[in-house]
Image (cartoon, helix red, strand yellow):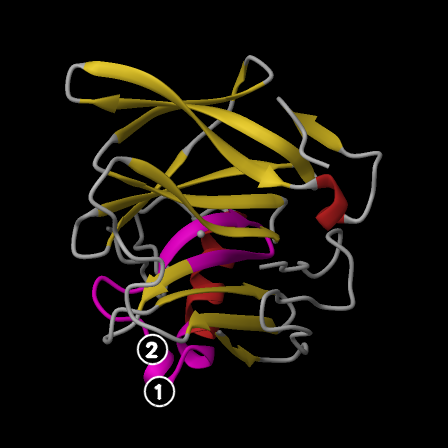
Amino acid sequence: MIQLVTGCMAVLSVTSCATSESAAGAPLPTSSREGVSATVTPGPSAVEPTSNEKAVAWATNEMNVAASGANSPAEPGLLVAAESNKGALFVWETADDRFCHGVAFMPGMTTVACSSHPNSPPVEGKPRLVPLVRMMATGWNVVFGAERETVESVTCNGRSLQVRDVGVMANGRRTVHAIEFPDITVGKVSVQVRRGTRVVTEYLELEKAEKAGAQDLASCGPVNR
């Protein structure tokens, strides 16, 4: 069960957060350890912040208001999983160890979704990748965790993808990473992970074609239909 808290836009289901606008405007959520400064205040000699930095600062303030009460972020606070010049996607854990994610986009749209139970998904005793968030925010954003192994690279059809190291969760037992595509992408990416002295390949599912609701979509590797 997912608990949902919304700002200006309604969330449409317990397994997915969705708005009525397209990815070109407001994000379309569908379901993923460093704090983020809530303000950007350059001094006289400081470099002027970029539009992304300004947007993340604004989004951080909005999300700290939206994620209130039991859904408030515990230390280290909001972790930025994706950003643009209009807002950001965040992930965090609550004081009772529930996983949450949310988006804040100009001119004032926020969504928050939190797990109903602590430690969900639970950390397992074997190395694995853990899907956490798949949604349209700054693009098609995929957030995942790695347990008992270190992510070294991610590829789609042999092409290297930029991997964002988001932070650490689950009391240091899960590192969190994020990748991004321009639009909904189905299939699986190849993830090279290190386990001690060995490097092995795992596969992370992006989205199933039938769930995405269309056949003419970008894809990585094998596509499950």
Question: Residue 77 in magenta?
Answer: yes
Q: Is residue 220 left or right of residue 152?
A: right
View extreme (bottom): residue: 69
Q: Quadrant of residue 164?
A: top left
Give the alpha-carbon distance from disc 1 to disc 2, as whole Å. Answer: 5 Å
Q: Which residues are magenta?
A: 64-90
Front residue of this view, candidates 160 and 131: 131
Q: Secondary structure at mark 2?
A: loop
Question: What is the tally of numbered marks visible in this picture?
Answer: 2
Q: Quadrant of residue 28?
A: bottom right
Residue 71's place in the image compared with 103, above or below, is: below
Front residue of this view, candidates 63 and 215: 215
Which numbered disc covers residue 72?
2
- Badge 1 density bin: few <14, some 14–19, many ≥20, Cα 10 Å: few
What residue do we see at 67% from left, 34% from top? 224
What x and y, as percent, mark residue 93? 30, 66
What x and y, as percent, mark residue 54? 48, 56
Residue 124's place in the image compared with 29, above or below, is: above
- Badge 2 density bin: few <14, some 14–19, many ≥20, Cα 10 Å: some
What residue do we see at 62% from left, 67% from top? 17
The amino acid pointed to by label 1 is Gly
The amino acid pointed to by label 2 is Ser
Circles 1 and 2, Cβ within 8 Å, touching? The answer is yes
What x and y, as percent, mark residue 19? 71, 68
Question: Residue 27 in magenta?
Answer: no
